[in-house]
Image (tube, rainbow, N blue to C red):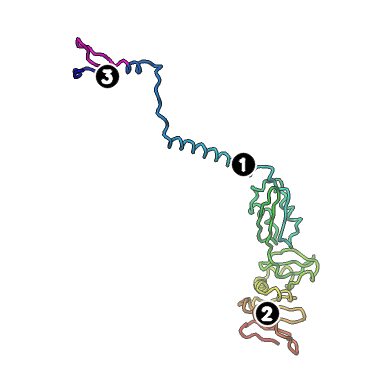
C-alpha cells in the first residue's frame, strides 16, 4: 500500500483510478443506530462511595425514626412519680403540682420544667429529676434550711436566713429552733438580716440549744439558751470566730457557780459572767 494521497480522508484508502475506499466497519457503526456500544466498568472507588452514601442515608433515617419514637411514644408516658428529700413540703402537694406532667413522655420532661411547676413552693431551693423507664420519674428535692421561728396568730412560722416563710408548726416544741421576738413583723425590721446571719453561722448542736434571739439594734444581738443562760453576741461581724468560741465555751465543764452569760462580742477576749 503506497502513501495516502493528499486530500484522502483518514480511514479511507486509495484505489485504482484515483478513487477512495472508506473503512466499511467504522461507517457501519456510525450509521447504524442499533449498534451496541460497550460501557467501561465503574471504578471501584466510585462504587464504594455510592454504597457508603446509601448506608449513611439509611442510618440517618433509622436514627430519626428512633428519636421520634423516644420523644413521642406513649410507651414512655409518665405514670408514676417518686419524690425524695422533702420534709417541709408534703409529698401530696408536690404530686398535685406535678400533675400536668402525667402522660407526658419522659424524654420531654426536664429539670427546668419540673422546677417551674414547683417555683411557688418556698421551702424548695432546687430539684433534680431522673427518668426510670418506662413510666417513672424520680424527683429529688433540696429544701432550704430553717434557722428560726416567729409566732403568729396561727402558730409558729419557720424562717430561713433570708426571711422566707418555709411553713408552720402548731407548737413551740415541734422544732428545736430559736424564737425571734417580735412576731412576723420582725422579718421586716432592720435587725433581722443581722440576726439571721448569726443563726445561719451557728453549728446545729448550738442552734438546737437556743431558745430565743433578739436585738434592739444590729449591734446588740442577744441569744438565750435553754436553762436561762444568755449570750451577748454584739454585731453580726466575725460570726465564724464567735461561733467557734461559743462552741468551745459551751463544751467546758460546768462552773460553780454556773455561768449565766457568755459574752463573745469580742471573740479574742470572751467573757463569762
Report the residue at 68% width, 74% height from top.
Answer: 203
Marks 1 and 2: which is nearer the front?
A: 1
Please state which of residues 179 and 11 is positioned toward the viewer in this rendering: 11
In the rendered image, residue 38 lying in the magenta stretch gets the answer: no
Query: In the image shown, does 234 or 29 lie closer to the viewer?
Result: 29
Q: Residues in magenta? A: 9-24
Name the disc covering residue 247, or none: 2
Residue closest to the far bottom? 256
Helix or strand or loop: what does disc 3 sit on? Answer: loop
74 and 13: which is toward the camera: 13
Asked if the residue at tag 3 contacts the one at tag 2, i.e. Cβ–Cβ closer than 8 Å, the answer is no
Q: Secondary structure at mark 2?
A: helix
Q: Which residue is mark 3?
A: 11
The residue wearing badge 1 is 68
Please say whether residue 13 is one of the residues in the magenta stretch. yes
| Quadrant that contains the N terminus | top left
Say if residue 263 shows up in the picture. yes
Percent of width and height locating residue 18: 19, 11
Amino acid at each position: 500500500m503506497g502513501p495516502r494521497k493528499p486530500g484522502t480522508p483518514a480511514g479511507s484508502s486509495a484505489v485504482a483510478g484515483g478513487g477512495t475506499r472508506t473503512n466499511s466497519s467504522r461507517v457501519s457503526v456510525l450509521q447504524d443506530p442499533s449498534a451496541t456500544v460497550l460501557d467501561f466498568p465503574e471504578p471501584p472507588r466510585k462504587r464504594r462511595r455510592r454504597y457508603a452514601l446509601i448506608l449513611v442515608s439509611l442510618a440517618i433515617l433509622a436514627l430519626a425514626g428512633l428519636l421520634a419514637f423516644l420523644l413521642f411514644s406513649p410507651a414512655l408516658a409518665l405514670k408514676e412519680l417518686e419524690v425524695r428529700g422533702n420534709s417541709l413540703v408534703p409529698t401530696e402537694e408536690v404530686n398535685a403540682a406535678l400533675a400536668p406532667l402525667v402522660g407526658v413522655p419522659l424524654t420531654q420532661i426536664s429539670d427546668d420544667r419540673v422546677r417551674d411547676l414547683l417555683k411557688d413552693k418556698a421551702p424548695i431551693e432546687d430539684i433534680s429529676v431522673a427518668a426510670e423507664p418506662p413510666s417513672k420519674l424520680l424527683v429529688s428535692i433540696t429544701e432550704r434550711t430553717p434557722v428560726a421561728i416567729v409566732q403568729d396568730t396561727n402558730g409558729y412560722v419557720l424562717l430561713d436566713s433570708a426571711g422566707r416563710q418555709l411553713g408552720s408548726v402548731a407548737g413551740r416544741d415541734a422544732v428545736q429552733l430559736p424564737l425571734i421576738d417580735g412576731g412576723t413583723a420582725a422579718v421586716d425590721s432592720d435587725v433581722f438580716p443581722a440576726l439571721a446571719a448569726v443563726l445561719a453561722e451557728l453549728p446545729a448542736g448550738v442552734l438546737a440549744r437556743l431558745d430565743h434571739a433578739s436585738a434592739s439594734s444590729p449591734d446588740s444581738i442577744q441569744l438565750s439558751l435553754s436553762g436561762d443562760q444568755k449570750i451577748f453576741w454584739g454585731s453580726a461581724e466575725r460570726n465564724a470566730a464567735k461561733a467557734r468560741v461559743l462552741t468551745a465555751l459551751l463544751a467546758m465543764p460546768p462552773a460553780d457557780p454556773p455561768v449565766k452569760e457568755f459574752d463573745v462580742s469580742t471573740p479574742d477576749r470572751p467573757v463569762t459572767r
